[in-house]
């Protein structure tokens, strides 16, 4: 049983869904500290004027140590984000087909007050649209305390996982030997080799929201979230 335990992001890039899709279970790791100017509440899209950030305004003043699942949304944002997406992707091949669906997500997200709930909504809906069969749960489903590796290990053990798939940034702190001693093999994602597709607005950019893939490739999107070469 392979598990991934990753903090949520707003409309993540294709690599995020590639990682989720390779696992039996994805744990939304939102009891960890919120980091400003990270991917938790923002992501990039391509526009006629270059790349642009879509950022959900959140309450951070005096809350420097708050966990992601405690972060509150500061003011209305969804309609502005949708209008920006509409302007950027209205000429994309599959925009008209997907627009009612994606706009519906934004209408639902606009009713949420916590960032983690917005991120979970988009993650679940996009994963479903991509045909991913991974079980998605919150980290509150499992007990977890201690250091970074100890927390991850506790969740993996509670989920009865024997493989832990991690993004490469965790190499700086993850204690592979400790997981191995508990019978859990660590596997590392490789984000190389994603195929390009016909993309709007200039030179190709891999590091944009998955919505770019969806609007430009439609039902072929799953083919573009897996590398052509996997190390």
Image: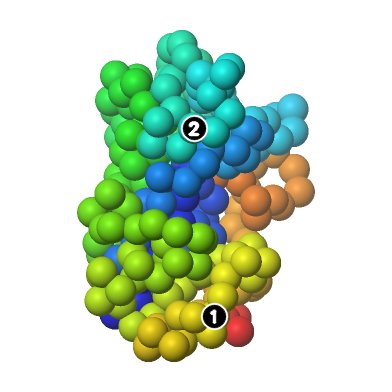
Quarter-of-image position of residue 157: bottom left
What quarter of the picture does the N terminus occupy? bottom left
Residue 218 position within the rendered picture, expressed as x and y whole percent measured from the top left: 41, 50
Q: Residue at x 59, y 38 (%)?
A: 35
**Label 2 residue SS:** loop
Q: Are marks 1 and 2 in contact (CB under 8 Å)?
A: no
Left/right placement of residue 193 relative to residue 163 reads right
Q: Residue at x 54, y 80 (%)?
A: 176
**x and y percent of residue 119 in the render?**
40, 38
Q: Earlier in the sequence, mark 1 or mark 2?
A: 2
C-alpha distance separating marks 1 and 2: 28 Å
Q: Position of residue 41 (x, y in %)?
A: 52, 33
Q: Residues within 10 Å of mark 2 (few under 14, many from 20)?
A: some
Q: Which residue is mark 1?
A: 176
Residue at the disc numbered 2: 66
Horizontal and vertical percent position of residue 2: 35, 76
- Seen from the viewer's position, the closer of residues 115 and 61 is 61
């Amino acid at each position: 049983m392979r598990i991934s335990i990753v903090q949520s992001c707003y409309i993540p890039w294709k690599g995020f869904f590639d990682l989720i899709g390779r696992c039996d279970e994805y744990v939304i790791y939102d009891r960890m500290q919120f980091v400003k100017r990270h991917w938790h509440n923002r992501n990039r899209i391509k526009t006629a004027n270059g790349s642009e950030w879509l950022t959900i305004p959140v309450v951070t003043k005096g809350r420097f140590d708050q966990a992601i699942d405690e972060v509150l949304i500061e003011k209305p944002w969804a309609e502005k984000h949708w209008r920006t997406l509409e302007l950027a992707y209205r000429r994309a091949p599959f925009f008209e087909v997907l627009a009612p669906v994606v706009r519906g997500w934004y209408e639902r997200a606009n009713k949420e007050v916590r960032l983690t709930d917005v991120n979970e909504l988009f993650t679940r809906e996009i994963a479903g649209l991509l045909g991913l069969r991974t079980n998605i749960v919150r980290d509150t489903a499992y007990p977890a305390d201690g250091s970074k590796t100890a927390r991850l290990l506790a969740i993996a053990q509670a989920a009865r996982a024997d493989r832990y798939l991690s993004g490469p940034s965790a190499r700086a702190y993850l204690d592979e030997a400790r997981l191995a001693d508990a019978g859990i093999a660590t596997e590392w994602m490789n984000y190389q080799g994603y195929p390009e597709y016909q993309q709007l607005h200039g030179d190709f950019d891999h590091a944009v929201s998955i919505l770019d893939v969806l609007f430009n490739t439609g039902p072929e999107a799953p083919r573009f979230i897996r590398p052509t070469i996997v190390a």
